[in-house]
Image (cartoon, coloured by chain):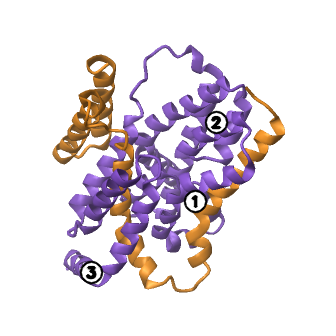
Chain colours: A orange, B purple
Amino acid sequence: MMLHAGHSLAIVGVTAVCTILIRAFPFLVFGGRKEVPGAVRYLGAVLPASIMAVLVVYCMRNMDFMAISHFAPSLAAGILVVGLHVWKKNILLSIGAGTVCYMMLVQMVFV
Amino acid sequence: MEEVQNGKGYIGFAFRQSVPVMLGYIFLGIAFGLLLQDAGYSFVWAFFISVIVYAGSMQFIMVSLMTGGAGLLYTAVMTFFINGRHIFYGLSFVEKYKKMGKACPYMVFSLTDETYSVLCGTKVPEGMKEDKVFFWISLFDHSYWVAGSVLGAVAGSYITIDTTGIDFSMTALFLVIVVEQWQEQRSHFAAITGAICGIIWLLLLGPDRFILPALCYCVVILLAVRGSVEGRTTKQKEEVAG
């Protein structure tokens, strides 16, 4: 239950300020310079591919290979998304079909 | 008149790019609004929090911090651990956003996981300014999140469709971006590094704490191989230019 509105507000404020500081960090450090260092420019170009791969692992982090119901839906829907996207290259189709497939698997098959 | 049409063109294009995020953000937002309402906070809080904090997983954790009356220092430390990965997102946009003037602070503020990945995957059509497209995509994403949160807090308890599993749309979005990047880039070193670092640190530290060390290791490894990867990337660019 809501304890103290004031303290809750302070928690919201601290979270907001910390989040914006984290997001602004590269801009605060490198944004003021005339020339962005070569290493940063290089990371800016190659890092997105690594980050996206880590984010996929992050989304799949709760897969448990000891129980089929804890990994089969993600795995099957994930393969469907990749397969559809390689085949049709339609973002909405890949995401829509993958999500519907996943929802059906967790709601009806692996309950 | 032309000006108006141009404006519409931008909004339409940005909207189409943001649709994959819409699905996920509205439903995740609803889940957040519901949680917040259950904890005793009204939709005003949901609106306010989603406008100024705008951080998916951290907002969920924040609800438990608020109901538990957590300390402010603890809150700050939690935020840095949960959102720390965002430090790396700006690296790709430092030069681009610097030139955006007044919009720059908003662009920096609104750089979430999902917006970052959509922006990485957006190919701006010729004749359109990248700045404007990026701004509208960011704004659309943010508004989905706010709309979902408020909707969840106001009407969440009336939603009777079973939405279990709808959060997979985020996983699917990330997978699609990985596939697109994979097909565009000649060198797959960065993607493979990310996958391996992610899996190793997940196995070592478990699901709650692995993402920051994994990203740090990616940076170190990518910097270590800079010479050879950069050589290949420039070769690729020359081929495209030729």
Residue assigned mark 1: B107
Distance Cα–Cα, label 3 vs label 1: 28 Å
Q: Residue at x 65, y 47 (%)?
A: B53
Q: Residue at x 30, y 22 (%)?
A: A104
User: Could you tell me which quadrant the C terminus of chain B lies in?
Assistant: bottom left
Q: Residue at x 22, y 70 (%)?
A: B187
Marks 1 and 2, the one that precedes in the sequence: 2
The three-letter amino acid code for the residue at tag 2 is Ser
Residue closest to the eye, A15 or A93: A15
Q: Residue at x 24, y 29 (%)?
A: A68
The three-letter amino acid code for the residue at tag 1 is Met
Is disc 2 placed on a helix, strand or loop? helix
Local crowd size for mark 2, using a 10 Å CA cut-off: few (<14), some (14–19), many (≥20): some
Residue assigned mark 3: B234
Q: Are marks 3 and 2 in contact (CB under 8 Å)?
A: no
Q: Are marks 3 and 2 on the same chain?
A: yes
Q: Are marks 1 and 2 on the same chain?
A: yes
The three-letter amino acid code for the residue at tag 3 is Thr
Where residue B141 sits: x, y (%)? Answer: 52, 45
Image-quadrant location for residue B171: top left
Residue closest to the eye, B160 or B75: B75
- Chain under label 2? B
Distance Cα–Cα, label 3 vs label 2: 48 Å
Where residue A76 sits: x, y (%)? Answer: 22, 34
Residue furthest to the left in view is: A87
Residue assigned mark 2: B64
Is disc 3 placed on a helix, strand or loop? helix
Image-quadrant location for residue B60: top right
- Chain under label 3? B
For residue B215, say whether it is visible.
yes
Please tell me the numbered disc located at residue B208. Answer: none
